[in-house]
Amino acid sequence: MIRARLLANGQEFDWQGQTSGIWVDAQAATDTELAQLRAAFPLNRLALEDVLEVGHWSRAEQYPEHAFITVRSYARPDTDDEFTERLSIFVFSDAVLTLSSHGTLALAQVWPMANGREALNSPHEVTYELLDHTADTFFTLADTLEAQVDKLEERVFRNEQKNPVADVFELKHLITQARRLANEAREATVLLSRYATATPADLVRYRDVQDSFTRAVNRFEGLREYLTSLLDLHLSLQSQRMNEVMRTLTAVSVIFLPLTFLAGVWGMNFEHMPELRSPFGYAFAWSSFLLIGGLLAAYFKRRGWW
Amino acid sequence: MIRARLLANGQEFDWQGQTSGIWVDAQAATDTELAQLRAAFPLNRLALEDVLEVGHWSRAEQYPEHAFITVRSYARPDTDDEFTERLSIFVFSDAVLTLSSHGTLALAQVWPMANGREALNSPHEVTYELLDHTADTFFTLADTLEAQVDKLEERVFRNEQKNPVADVFELKHLITQARRLANEAREATVLLSRYATATPADLVRYRDVQDSFTRAVNRFEGLREYLTSLLDLHLSLQSQRMNEVMRTLTAVSVIFLPLTFLAGVWGMNFEHMPELRSPFGYAFAWSSFLLIGGLLAAYFKRRGWW
Amino acid sequence: MIRARLLANGQEFDWQGQTSGIWVDAQAATDTELAQLRAAFPLNRLALEDVLEVGHWSRAEQYPEHAFITVRSYARPDTDDEFTERLSIFVFSDAVLTLSSHGTLALAQVWPMANGREALNSPHEVTYELLDHTADTFFTLADTLEAQVDKLEERVFRNEQKNPVADVFELKHLITQARRLANEAREATVLLSRYATATPADLVRYRDVQDSFTRAVNRFEGLREYLTSLLDLHLSLQSQRMNEVMRTLTAVSVIFLPLTFLAGVWGMNFEHMPELRSPFGYAFAWSSFLLIGGLLAAYFKRRGWW
Amino acid sequence: MIRARLLANGQEFDWQGQTSGIWVDAQAATDTELAQLRAAFPLNRLALEDVLEVGHWSRAEQYPEHAFITVRSYARPDTDDEFTERLSIFVFSDAVLTLSSHGTLALAQVWPMANGREALNSPHEVTYELLDHTADTFFTLADTLEAQVDKLEERVFRNEQKNPVADVFELKHLITQARRLANEAREATVLLSRYATATPADLVRYRDVQDSFTRAVNRFEGLREYLTSLLDLHLSLQSQRMNEVMRTLTAVSVIFLPLTFLAGVWGMNFEHMPELRSPFGYAFAWSSFLLIGGLLAAYFKRRGWW
Amino acid sequence: MIRARLLANGQEFDWQGQTSGIWVDAQAATDTELAQLRAAFPLNRLALEDVLEVGHWSRAEQYPEHAFITVRSYARPDTDDEFTERLSIFVFSDAVLTLSSHGTLALAQVWPMANGREALNSPHEVTYELLDHTADTFFTLADTLEAQVDKLEERVFRNEQKNPVADVFELKHLITQARRLANEAREATVLLSRYATATPADLVRYRDVQDSFTRAVNRFEGLREYLTSLLDLHLSLQSQRMNEVMRTLTAVSVIFLPLTFLAGVWGMNFEHMPELRSPFGYAFAWSSFLLIGGLLAAYFKRRGWW
Ligand SMILES: [Mg+2]
Ligand SMILES: [Mg+2]
Ligand SMILES: [Mg+2]
Ligand SMILES: [Mg+2]
Ligand SMILES: [Mg+2]
Ligand SMILES: [Mg+2]
Ligand SMILES: [Mg+2]
Ligand SMILES: [Mg+2]
Ligand SMILES: [Mg+2]
Ligand SMILES: [Mg+2]
Ligand SMILES: [Mg+2]
Ligand SMILES: [Mg+2]
Ligand SMILES: [Mg+2]
Ligand SMILES: [Mg+2]
Ligand SMILES: [Mg+2]
Ligand SMILES: [Mg+2]
Ligand SMILES: [Mg+2]
Ligand SMILES: [Mg+2]
Ligand SMILES: [Mg+2]
Ligand SMILES: [Mg+2]
Ligand SMILES: [Mg+2]
Ligand SMILES: [Mg+2]
Ligand SMILES: [Mg+2]
Ligand SMILES: [Mg+2]
Ligand SMILES: [Mg+2]
Ligand SMILES: [Mg+2]
Ligand SMILES: [Mg+2]
Ligand SMILES: [Mg+2]
Ligand SMILES: [Mg+2]
Ligand SMILES: [Mg+2]
Ligand SMILES: [Mg+2]
């Protein structure tokens, strides 16, 4: 599907190969449509290869024919699924061409805005607005992931039996991915503003969107560090519980092993065991048990074992 | 609320749209006030967006219309709460405009100082003074956090049962946040001095305040590393205590399990157990117990188990 | 073996020392052949040393006589074996010379393509195409290794007894190697494009292949980080199982040690033990056993030990 | 206290405000003395603030009025105490002014050397010599700390019970501090040589002292890494001992639990237990004990448990 | 000892202060010899200090009088001992002077080669050749250390009782040292080629030797990372063995503690225990033992504990 707008007043029209003063948007372009676009615009071969390669990452380049940027972002940033989408922008001196497989969130927002209003009627202004809305999707995702980190934090602090490690692992992987994508988008924007032949006002805009991507990167980075700390805390709490378990086992064993031994001694069948005959023997035995057990318990109490 | 001062002599006056030789300060500006400011000063749209966005971080930019810096700092650095505030400064060639939602600590200190005295009567001098006082709030916070780290250190060295890990976790998070804010303020200052059209004397001042932010960053960094070492020390002491517990359990088990077995043997009911009839049987049994137990105890003693 | 093609139309011919407008490819060159090449082309001595040194890594240099790049890549990237191969390219202003010990995957693909078609008939275009196909072998390897990481992940999540650590270790080593080779290839390409006397169109091509190598590096880096997280997850799951084992041991010991002690007490042979004669003694004993055991079991149940 | 020397011949004289061809040294300057110095020399206000601020770190700046460097170093580097001192140097084109609270080790060494000899009679030469002697104090400290690391290493290898972790913690903190101070001194020197208006011969000298500070930094860095490895070794040895303890406990338990059970069985009071009446019953019991115990012991022996 | 060669034809001759067209080599120079050298050559004072300081590290500087490089390397790289040596080279426009305390491996190899042959008859060519042979000693050392890492790897995989941690610790320290020395040599070479007044051909040579040092650094870095992984693997295998030990202990305890309790119960001396009189009591007891023990064993079997 190919659609086009005049940059000057935003009016949509049926594209027939015009190449000046317009924004052309092609989604899921067929081979015929691609051929039309190549006939109308001098599209660099390497740029087009990047556009068509499934899974390509964010990248920018100043080709002799045009500036070029392709940016990968998340398709559903308000959920935690990993589905991504990509928008490629060809910036000519008097036209802008956007290519994508099924459109992106940013494109869906900016296309209706381009109704000829000021600050959205030059190729670089359109590019800036698209990148700025792309950056916003990363902020949405950061909010989504932050909410999940908060839930995990609560679980760790409530010290539940259910192990949070596998969930931390999954979430960390998501965050690392998001950080990588945001960083790649940032670097592409940096390259675009470094090499593209843009006015000072355009450069200020590109630095603004770079700053947005950088803030997104830093939020993801902060979330990742927080998650790492959270995992350390969980492991430490788990290890502390383990210590308590071992202290319990040791204290009970140390108290009852000697007592059981003594009971075993007085259960031996030697014929000559004078104390067995004494009328106070049994009372003496229980006194020994209580004394020894009590002393050991007091000792562990004083060492702070419970 | 909008208030204004003459830069030359510090005199306050009722601002009616003047734009030269003055410092205008607007706090919690209403829409009407914002419109007045925009009418008087050529405020860059992107800069204003950053000012109005809640939660924006520290940033600087040289816009065609003016230099701009916005700096986030702590509102109550003498406590450990995380509440932050932000001051935005528009630096024109002959005027300075400060915007904030409720003022900041630095602003409250510098506004009364601007009574026309030397070194505080040009836009860049006002900016420097505001940034310098902002940097001081980070030093105050570093003192606050240092005191808390010292308390935690004492707890770890006193080797209390109460687990310090959750507190270390909270404090580390605070310090990491503070480090990030100080670093972002530093980078904004670096950018301001790199791009702003300032005199060599202004640049020397900005490098001075950069140095202050850098020192703050390094103090937080040092605190964080110290906290990490402290946690390692705690874990190591805990693990050592665990080892002692296990050694106790093992020694007691190894001594009493054989003895209990022997007592069990002599408690068996076989008819033909000659030693049970011997008048010295019982004495022999106790001698065995003492000998075996003593040998094992001596062995553990020599291995240094207690 | 020495073979040659005309760059203009790709025609193969029998090389007799021609040095202009051609691509000469020498594989497993004999001393005689090397002497012929040195006689025809001004090959830099240091470059030739690098070519002939077994095990040399990727490197590029602009010698006074020619540009030079040598790139090491994997010979069988669709398997996980570590076998590598190397291709050395001498780029003259009007000729290109490739040297290798037994050819490489990239060479085998590009040689037949060089049939005079556009974008493959200058020395730098041949070099670009060879490097681009070399970069592709790293993507193939990344796919191979990704599949293996996935298998390991499944094993960890299924929580098998069979320890995955040794396999993680082997795979991590492979990935680290691959990351290093891809990174060295990238750096060589960067150096080639920085120093070589190439046209802007050549530079755009070299940046494209740099970007490919960078993506390969980042995929390997991502795989390595993922593997590290996976290992942490395994260790954490293992440690959790260990905790369960210890809890089981402790609970069973804490329940049965006191009961066994009590049974031992009532098995003692004192003559005066009134409860032994009571007709309800045995029932009382069992009641005690069940009560004590039940209380302890309920206590552990409430602490969530099973 | 203010004292002064002629740079040309090193002669000391009573300073009365002279500002050319001299080295003025002020220690613990009173307010009056400071006023005298400010009257004589154009001291930059920001530089003076840094000088007077207690606890300021190393820093250099090229002020419009003069070059300036302030360097913090250790007061007693031959001991391991943390006491530091600081020397501030104002470098004018024809005079040098040094300020400190109580002098420093370097100052005490260089002041007597400045007797007019070559290579010590210009402001930059004096500055170089002071910095060079300051760098030497870091080498002394590195020797001191190295000796302590060696002692700790011996303790770890002798595998003493006394836990070295707290000492490692203290020493690591000291080394980290020292590394930071040396690094800050190095960076100040780098800045001084980058901005100061110095001759090529001066620059060569400054690079020499930078190199000294870098070597100090790297020695501290090396010590810290060594200490980290040492701690890992200690933890690993401790964990190994723990393993041995657990193996001992397990082996003894696994051998004696079944034997004790068997003895308990034959100690039961059932009326119909034929083997109890057999004349070979007791011998058979002991044979069982020895056989079972021996088999289990052999099994553990073969598994290498002792 | 001082010896000299003509650079043009390599002829050795008795040095009497000549300073042009020659290579002078001084080893273990006496004070007299040093004075002779200083009289003949304008040796920079700071360079000479570095030469004479015992333990100085690798460094290069372009002094006004001459270029200078001093490189520390291993004296016996085919063994794993830590003994190092150092060679200092003064590069004049028409002469080269080498100083060392007892010669170095590289010097011993290059001196006889300097027989006037091409590519070894200018000061920079001699310097290059010396540095190149020095780099080779690091490759030899890398081979030596690689062989030791391989041995340790085998030990870890054979899973021996003998703890490899102390050996890993020693070897890691050696490798870290080697990496540092190689890196310092590399940086010195970089500095030499950056500042020295050398021809393009000389610069290509210096970049070649830099590349060699970089490869050495990376081999040591790779070895260190491998060793770290190996240690992790060992710890993981050790921890797994520990888990098996604990599972054994727990299973045996959980099976035999209840059985021993039951045997104790039937060993009690209550008068009214009806089952003791039953003719099937003993058989019932054994049936209980086997049933309970069997069920528990089956349970552990199913949980995969052995
Ligand atoms: Mg990463
Ligand atoms: Mg990345
Ligand atoms: Mg970041
Ligand atoms: Mg990172
Ligand atoms: Mg970061
Ligand atoms: Mg971090
Ligand atoms: Mg770590
Ligand atoms: Mg940051
Ligand atoms: Mg950070
Ligand atoms: Mg820092
Ligand atoms: Mg620092
Ligand atoms: Mg850090
Ligand atoms: Mg740091
Ligand atoms: Mg650090
Ligand atoms: Mg690496
Ligand atoms: Mg990377
Ligand atoms: Mg990394
Ligand atoms: Mg990375
Ligand atoms: Mg640091
Ligand atoms: Mg360092
Ligand atoms: Mg280093
Ligand atoms: Mg380092
Ligand atoms: Mg470091
Ligand atoms: Mg390191
Ligand atoms: Mg290092
Ligand atoms: Mg490296
Ligand atoms: Mg590397
Ligand atoms: Mg590295
Ligand atoms: Mg490293
Ligand atoms: Mg690494
Ligand atoms: Mg680690």
Image (cartoon, coloured by chain):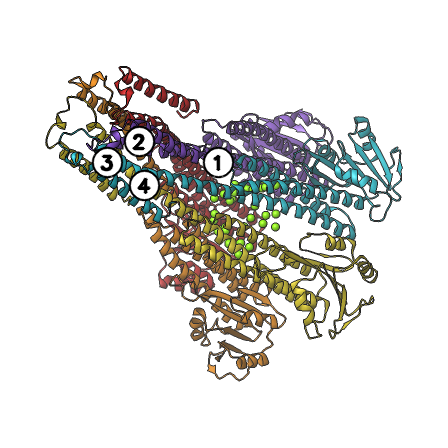
Chain colours: A purple, B cyan, C red, D yellow, E orange
Is the distance from the Cβ of mark 4 to the nearest ligand 31 atom less than 8 Å?
A: no
* 3D distance between C-alphas at marks 3 and 2: 12 Å
Of helix, strand and loop, which one carries label 4? helix
Residue type beneath disc 2:
Thr
In the picture of the structure, the residue carrying the numbered disc 2 is A260
Q: Which mark is residue A236?
A: 1
The answer as to whether callout 2 falls within 8 Å of ligand 31 is: no
> Which is more toward the observer, A167 or E297?
E297
Quadrant for the C terminus of chain C in the image: top left
The residue that disc 3 covers is B262
Ligand 7 lies under 8 Å from the Cβ of mark 1: no
Q: Residues within 10 Å of mark 3 (few under 14, many from 20)?
A: many
Percent position (x, y) of residue A91?
63, 37
Q: Is mark 3 within 8 Å of ligand 31?
A: no
Q: Residue at x 63, y 58 (%)?
A: D73
The residue nearer to you, when weighing D243 against C285, is C285
Q: Nearer the viewer, mark 4 or mark 3?
A: 3
Q: Amino acid at mark 3?
A: Leu
Amino acid type indicated by mark 4: Arg
Q: Which mark is residue D247?
A: 4
Q: How many residues crowd mark 2 within 10 Å: few (<14), some (14–19), many (20+)?
A: many
Q: Residue furthest front?
A: A279
Of all chains, the one bearing label 3 is B
Circles 3 and 2 on the same subunit? no
Q: Check if mark 4's residue and mark 3's residue have beta carbons within 8 Å.
A: no
Distance from disc 1 to disc 3, alpha carbons, whole Å, reads 42 Å
Quarter placement of the N terminus of chain C: bottom left
